[in-house]
Amino acid sequence: MLRELRTASLRDAPYAFGDSLEDALSADAAVYDAAAARHADSHAATSFILYTEGHPAGLIGANFESAPARRAFVFALWVAPAVRHLRGGELLLNAALEWLVSEGATQVYAWVTDSNTTAMRFYERLGFGPTGDHARSQHSPEQWETLLVRDVSDLAQPAPAQ
Ligand SMILES: CC(C)(COP(=O)(O)OP(=O)(O)OC[C@H]1O[C@@H](n2cnc3c(N)ncnc32)[C@H](O)[C@@H]1OP(=O)(O)O)[C@@H](O)C(=O)NCCC(=O)NCCS
C-alpha cells in the first residue's frame, strides 16, 4: 500500500517531493513492505494513510531526525486529486502531529517547495510559519525549498491528576 500511494503521489505531483518516481519504481517492493512493518511500531518514524469510502486516497510521513537535535518532521503529504478540498490533508496532518506529540515533539517542521503555493497555503492555514531556513532541493537544485515550523505544545495532553 505504501508503495502504491508513494508512486501515485510522485506521478501526480513530482514538483512537491524531493525524490523521483524512477527511484520509487526501481526500489524493490520489499523495501516498502519493510518500511511499513517498521512504521507500525517505531517511535522514530511512521506513516498514516487516508481512506475515503474504503479506498486509499492519501498519505503522510512523520519522523524524528537522529539525535542530538531530534527535530520532528512531517513529509510526503499527498491527497488524491479526486478527493482534495475535503479536509483529507488536514486529517492526515492532524494524525501525524498527534503522533509526534505523543512521542515528545513540541515543534514540528516541514520542507515545502517554494513554487508549491497550494502546499504553502495549506501549511500556513494550519498554523505553520517560516523558520528562515531556505535551501536548494537536493534532487532538483533549480528548485528552492522553505522550512516551515509549527509549535505543537498546545496539542499535548496535560498529565491526568493523581
Ligand atoms: C496540499 C494537499 C495535501 C492539501 O490536501 P487537501 O485535502 O486538499 O487539503 P484540505 O482540504 O485539508 O485543506 C485544508 C486547507 O488548506 C488550504 N488549501 C488546500 N488546498 C488549497 C489550494 N489549492 N489553494 C489554497 N489553499 C489551499 C485551505 O486553506 C484549506 O482550508 P479551506 O478549505 O477552509 O480553505 C493537496 O493539495 C496535495 O496532495 N497536493 C499535491 C502534493 C503536495 O503538494 N503535497 C505537499 C508536499 S509539501
Image (spheres, grey):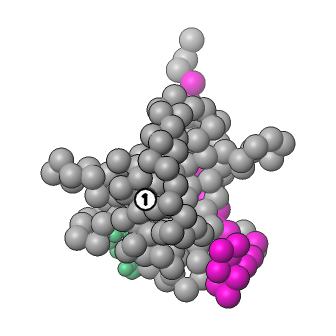
31 with respect to 104 (left or right): left
Q: Nearer the viewer, residue 32 or 71?
A: 32
Q: Residue 90 sits in which quadrant?
A: bottom left
- Residue 95 located within the stretch drawn in magenta: no
Circle 1 SS class: helix
Q: Is residue 119 visible?
A: no
Residue sitting at x 46%, y 54% = 60
Magenta stretch: give its range: 133-159
Q: Residue 5 sits in which quadrant?
A: bottom left
Q: Dot 1 corresponds to which residue? A: 6
Residue 35 locus on image (x, y percent): 52, 41
Image height check: is 100 above or below 128?
above
Residue sitting at x 18%, y 47% = 54
Amino acid tagged 1: Arg
Residue sitting at x 54%, y 64% = 23
67 with respect to 127 (left or right): right
Residue 9 locus on image (x, y percent): 40, 66
Image height check: is 6 above or below 142?
above
Residue 83 locus on image (x, y percent): 24, 66
Q: Image quadrant for the C terminus? A: top right
Image height check: is 54 above or below 57?
above
Residue sitting at x 74%, y 76% = 135
Q: Is residue 70 visible?
A: yes
Label 1 near ligand 1 (CB < 8 Å): no
Residue 122 locus on image (x, y percent): 45, 71
Which residue is most to the top? 162
